[in-house]
Image (cartoon, rainbow, N blue to C red):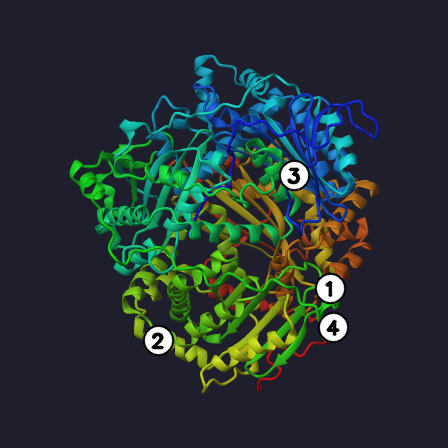
Amino acid sequence: MTVTQCARQSPGRAGRSPTDSRGPGGSDGVTTGVLKRYDNIIKSAEDKREYRGLQLTNGLKVLLVSDPTTDKSAAAMDVNVGYLSDPDELPGLAHFCEHMLFLGTEKYPEENEYNKFLSEHGGSSNASTSSDHTTYYFDVLPDHLGKALDIFAQFFISPLFTESATGRELSAVNSEHEKNAASDTWRLDQLNKSTADPDHPYHKFGTGNRDTLETIPKQKGIDVRKELLKFHKQWYSASIMTLVVVGKETLSELEALVAPLFTQVADRGTRAPSWPQHPYPEGRRRKRAYCLPVKDLRSLSIDFPIPDTRKHYKSGPGHYLSHLLGHEGPGSLLSALKAKGWCNSLVGGTRIGARGFGFFGVQVDLTEKGTEHIDEIVELVFQYIAMVRREGAQRWVWEEQRDLMAMEFRFKDTQEPRSLVTGHVHLLQEFPMEDVLSAYYLITEWRPELIDELLELLIPENVRIGIVAKCFAEKCTQVEPWYGTKYLQEDIEDAKINAWKAAKPPPELHLPPPNEFIPSRLDLETSSDVTSEAIAPAIIKDTPLMRLWFKRDNEFMLPKAFVTMDLVSPLAYADPVCCNLTSVWVLLLRDQLQQFAYAAELAGLRWSLGNAKYGLSVTIDGYDDKQHVLLEKIVDSIVHFKTDPQRFEIMKESHVRAIRNFEAEQPYQHAVYHQALCLSDLVWTRCQLLDAAKEITAEQLDDFAARMMRRVHVEALMFGNLTRQRALQIADTIESKLPKDATPLLAQQLMLYREVELEKGAWYVRETENSVHKSSCASLYYACGVRAARSNVTLELLAHALSEPCFHVLRTKEQLGYIVFSGVRRSNGVQGLRVIVQSDRHPAFLERRIDAFLQGAREYLENMTEEEFAKHRSALAAQRLERPKRMSSKASQLWSEITAQVYNFDRPRVEVEQLNTVTKEELIQFYMKHISADSSERQKLSVHVLSTAEGGAGRREQDEDETDTTGKQAEPIKITDLVEFKCRRRLYPHPIPFTNIPRKGAQCKL
Ligand SMILES: [Zn+2]
């Protein structure tokens, strides 16, 4: 896989003169506050949106995007500063500052004003802090962009940083760090930083915690709130900020909205910091580090310090080398590593550290055997680099990439407003205005000397090697200070360096062949088809073996299609052994197809092959021209599967490790898992799967795969730029590829799994422990019955109305923890309300706090004015009616109706019609019936995940009990024996199909 970090470089060049610079004070509606205007932004030929760049008088750079058809508006602000600019004595200050901006400004002093407004108007928001950027964004219904922008702008004009909020929000920052503390991604990232030059800011700890932002500053007499104000004053300057706004207004209207507001942001003349010195100077190269992971992970990274390559975005030298080293086709580095049985996956490419420096890296996973051949893997990397050097920069390789990227730019799916603003607000910091949309797509300058220059840096003398594996635990005698990660860093021996310098490429390493998946036909179908105007796809083939749904697209108008296919078999989940065999089979299939399908991926054909309880699923999405070639290859691989015994052992080990590693997942994920264990009629537990996995063999898999393909039902959807003849042809080819002796399944074998029904008035609790994370978790679920149009929207409305207050009360006010979630849970056709809190407090305490919040919700709902109620209802309605922006999202919507066997293809319209007649009274009744503790019909399931890690809540229940003042609560019934629990409960029926479509398997015998 190739990774080229799409981000940010300050090329240090002035924007070219704008084509339109009427300037302030001009006639036709020119806005004050605008210094320059850019109407020459390069966009894709198919892009219907309009763009304008602005430079305001205070230096703020703005990109305006006008889209009269948009059903969401959005904005993002980026400040060109991050945690590398934290004061040395206050690690995490930039991040803390980011949290604080949301909590009140002079004009809007209420702590939850922003989120409340967004929630009532169909919006959402978030923010992030990286090494050299801090980014804020929101989206909202188009009619409310103006007000949302006004609230948003105040963050950068006059934030309050109140004493009270500062004190409390620190807990959220600390809880965020605790969430990361046992996560290997965060630990490894910090280990890299901690082994950098200590005088370089890259060395810093960026998240911050209670120690760095409260305890230690207190000891030193530092006033953190004052420092926050100082930091904001120093860095939050219009001169280093960029803003992107998407709205339905015209460009001039957007300009008139944005300019007067954002010119109020102070220009303090601040310049964006840059770090041209590399954090790994001479003395910190030629290093090898071993690191002990929390999970049972095995990986090897081979990194080279390089300069920031973004200034060369027009010639893409980093992209060229990333393409070759990350290739997975014939002759590639990965193919050679796989042939040796050392690795299964590889990611290669450039990444930016922060403005001024970067890395070129190759990262591979390691098989058990791979851990014994580390130096040889590194040698193979140097052999591949030597081959690339020997071949010299190849113009045809570069041109192939150039053409593919230009094609991608031309036929890009419409971006969601929210991802458009967050992506481009960074690009705006780094690229000239006219290139802000095209910078990573259009490469125009062939400059082989830049490729050579970069290649010169990928030498053994510069290398830094990182090995992550439990088997090196004994070596790891050093401790990283922020996360406590055990590791050892050592120098690489001269002899090794010399051997790698002399690396000669073996014949199996060569440049990739020309890509045969590049589409040659990019025309749109012009013939007419009834399905193009219809809402529902049509069944155009229905045999006992296969059912095909088809719909011609008339909305996206791109030369693309989406093909998805389920191969259903009751065998897939029949018992834990079968479940394991299916999983390992899928791993092996992906492994087998990788080399062939990689070229297709490069040519814009995304594909996936997965397994679920019902069987296998295959999806292909992208240019329709050569889709069938890939699909047929995938089906061939499935039908004619033959296990390679060596690959089998490797994939089995990887599968077993993945099951085991779930142990170290976040507590809230454990809660979600246990909830499913209790509520789904049939689930094999991780323990059962682990036990059964030990005994599976390659012979078993061959037999299993053959048996499964002889008794299978295929259901497929083809949607997009396709004719029904072509769709039928593809489907017929697939059917003809099934084994000749294949027989259809029986109708009963196509039934869906079902959900356990809790009896009315019941309250159950499932308790479990986790020993890895310090955080505990409580998840409360209130079942609301089988899905139906009216209860769907009433429940959604309840969740919508409670979401913001839930976050405000449990996180901002009570500071229970960083992860506070509330929303609808749906499974097996049944739904309910769920609230999850992950915290350093005891789950029993969390249960009481969530309950208290939900009890208070009655008053909240009753006191809600009709106007507020109407706002929530129309916000939800608008959200539900939002059109999918991509062909693939639309296809997924259709497909989910098919797999759930409900077939309500017009669901948004049908349900919004219901929603519009739900009254406040009805909402309160719904709450009183399903959520209120006073209800005799309430059906509640709690899951408690208790941390038994050192410093966790495992031994603290007594302290927490003192805060319990209610005392009157009933006691829940503990679920200890899952089978006993389930066999005493009823199962819910499935929702009734919405339209009269022959049941899936209606062609099959009963
Ligand atoms: Zn944060």
Classed neighbour count for the residue bearing mark 2: other residues with Cα under 10 Å, few (<14), some (14–19), many (≥20): some
Mark 2: which amino acid?
Asp
Percent coordinates x, y for residue 426 in the rendering: 56, 35
* Residue 254 in view of the camera: yes
Residue that label 2 marks: 702
Distance from label 3 to label 2 (Cα)? 57 Å
Q: Which residue is mark 1?
A: 906
Amino acid type, label 3: Ile
Residue at image point 60% right, 35% down = 425
Sequence-first tag of 3 and 4? 3
Question: Crowding near pointer 3: few (<14 within 10 Å), some, many (20+)?
Answer: some
Q: CA distance from mark 2 to mark 1?
A: 43 Å
Look at the picture and state if 704 lies above or below 980.
Answer: below
Question: Residue at point 44% right, 65% down?
Answer: 684
Q: Write down the residue under mark 3.
A: 41
Instruction: Please tell me which residue is depicted at 62% across the width and 34% down the height of the picture.
Output: 433
